[in-house]
Amino acid sequence: MKLKHKILKSDLKIPINYCQHLGLEAQDTFIVSYPKSGSTWFRFVLYELLTDNHATFEKVNYTIPTIGKHFGKDLETNYGRFIKSHEPFRKDYGKAVVMVRDVRDVIISEFNYNKKMGFIKKDFPFNDFINQFVEKSVNRFGNYAENLNSWITAKENNKADILFIKYEDMKADPYLQFSKVNTFLDLNRNLEFIKQKIENNTVAKMQKKEQLSNDRTLKSADASIPFVRKGTSRQWVNVYSTEQLDLIENNFEDILLYFKYK
């Protein structure tokens, strides 16, 4: 995983990325987010809305795979094919649900995820991580602002059919937000059905699913650091110093204002 992480952050990403996007179809629907923005929880509920089956890491990752892992699989559901992506907007993405999360919480989750996967050492300074996140990127999907701005521009210019869903709104009123998704994707599921699928995938239940999972990526990571954490919003309030918060807010002010975080 560490070698793959390094390769995909290098210039080799360009040809690899091209190959990963082969075989897409105009009717595909994409589940998009910048990493650590709540797409795992979203996909678990969506999987159950699509299939009416119990969601596990294995089933969700197979039926709603990451871009590049969609080859040679019978992924067609009764509502079409769904593919996960963390990439900036591309013309291949004609219809997408885009998950958004407060960047101040994203940084904290990314920091813990990078430690879990061994991409950084456990004693890596948090302040150095913040600087790297702000100045360039801590993953292969580009800077947070550049990535998300590509989706904002695409929506405003009507380049694709895009629904933005804020993670914080999902936490506050999941029934309302998944009802919006239900309408956007023409699933025609009733409210009681939607409520049941949400209740099947609470944080506690997803943590249990993680413990029972045989997913190869999870098994290869540091088990002492959970993948499914508390799932809370505004965890950043008691984490950052004034200087760190100023740095983050000054660099991502436009995004924070656009999604009414500030």
Image (spheres, rainbow, N blue to C red):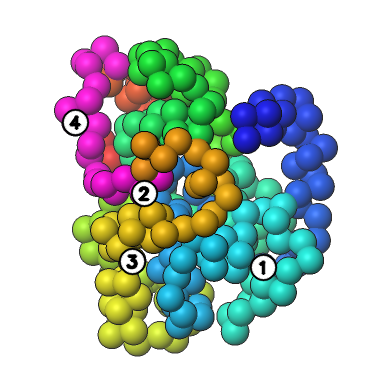
Whether residue 185 sits left or right of residue 62 in the image: it is left
- Residue that badge 2 annotates: 228
Vertical placement of 17 versus 116: above or below?
below
Q: Which of marks 2 and 4 precedes in the sequence?
A: 2
Neighbour tally class for label 3: few under 14, some 14-19, many 20 plus, Cα within 10 Å: many
Whether residue 211 sits left or right of residue 241 in the image: it is right
**Label disc, if present, on residue 201 of the rendered structure:** 3
Q: Provide the secondary structure element on which disc 1 rests.
A: loop
Q: Amino acid at mark 2?
A: Val
Q: Provide the residue span drawn in magenta.
A: 227-244
- Residue that badge 4 annotates: 237
Q: Amino acid at mark 4?
A: Val
Q: Is residue 163 visible?
A: no
Neighbour tally class for label 2: few under 14, some 14-19, many 20 plus, Cα within 10 Å: many
Q: Which of marks 3 and 4 precedes in the sequence?
A: 3
**Principal SS element in the magenta part?**
loop
Q: Is residue 185 visible?
A: yes
Residue at the extreme left of the image, as rendered: 238
The residues bearing labels 3 and 2 have C-alpha atoms spaced at a distance of 11 Å
Q: Provide the secondary structure element on which disc 2 rests.
A: loop
State which quadrant residue 203 falls in.
bottom left
Q: Provide the secondary structure element on which disc 3 rests.
A: loop
State which quadrant residue 177 falls in.
bottom left
